[in-house]
Image (cartoon, rainbow, N blue to C red):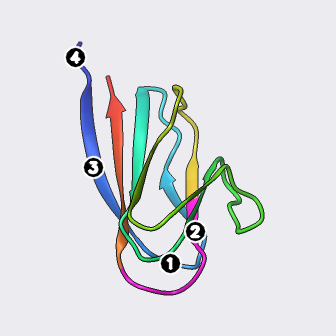
């Protein structure tokens, strides 16, 4: 089966938010921080500005460098507008 992709938008918030849930069919994903603030992204739950996997700068993409099918969560450092675009590739 050929892979497919799904794109979702996650609005900027200072409340920890689940970007992607657990999904065994996920082959990879990319997050584009389309806001003016920094996005703290975590492979797992319980994200905070002190517990995260990667800090994604304003208007910057990040591609997960390996196959990960677990929860992905994120939170922004401050209030503002905009959103992150999350592209999930699956089979």
From the top left corner, tell me how far across and down residue 84 is, in percent: 38, 63
x and y percent of residue 71 in the render?
A: 57, 45
Quadrant of the drawing holding the N terminus:
top left
For the magenta stretch, what is the residue range?
A: 74-81
Mark positioned earlier in the residue sequence (2 or 3): 3
Which residue has dot 2 on it?
75
Secondary structure of the residue carrying tag 1 is loop
Mark 1 or mark 2: which comes first in sequence? 1
Could you tell whether 12 is left or right of 34 in the image?
right
Q: Which residue is mark 1?
A: 13
Q: Which of the labelled discs sits on residue 2, or is there none?
A: 4
Where in the figure is residue 40, as x and y percent of width and height?
60, 62
The disc, 4 or 2, on the residue closer to the chain's N-terminal end is 4
Gap between marks 1 and 4, in whole Å? 34 Å
Q: Residue at x 41, y 38 (%)?
A: 29
Q: Cβ–Cβ below 8 Å for labels 2 and 3?
A: no
Query: Disc 4 vs disc 2: Cβ atoms closer than 8 Å?
Result: no
Q: Residues within 10 Å of mark 3 (few under 14, many from 20)?
A: few
User: Which secondary structure, mark 3?
Assistant: strand
Q: Are marks 1 and 4 in contact (CB under 8 Å)?
A: no
Nearer to us: label 4 or label 2: 2
Q: CA distance from mark 1 to mark 2?
A: 6 Å
Q: Secondary structure at mark 2?
A: strand
**SS class of the residue under badge 4?**
loop
> Which residue: 60% across, 77% down?
77
Which residue lies under the disc numbered 3?
7
Res 70 label: none
Which of the two discs, 3 and 1, labels the residue nearer the N terminus? 3
């Amino acid at each position: 089966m050929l892979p497919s992709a799904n794109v979702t938008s996650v609005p900027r918030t200072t409340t920890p938010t689940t970007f992607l849930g657990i999904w065994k069919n996920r082959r990879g994903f990319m997050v584009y921080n389309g806001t003016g603030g920094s996005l703290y992204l975590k492979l797992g739950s319980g994200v905070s500005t002190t517990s995260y996997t990667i800090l994604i700068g304003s208007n910057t993409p990040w591609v997960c460098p390996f196959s990960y099918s677990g929860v992905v969560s994120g939170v922004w450092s401050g209030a503002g507008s905009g959103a992150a675009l999350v592209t999930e590739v699956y089979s």
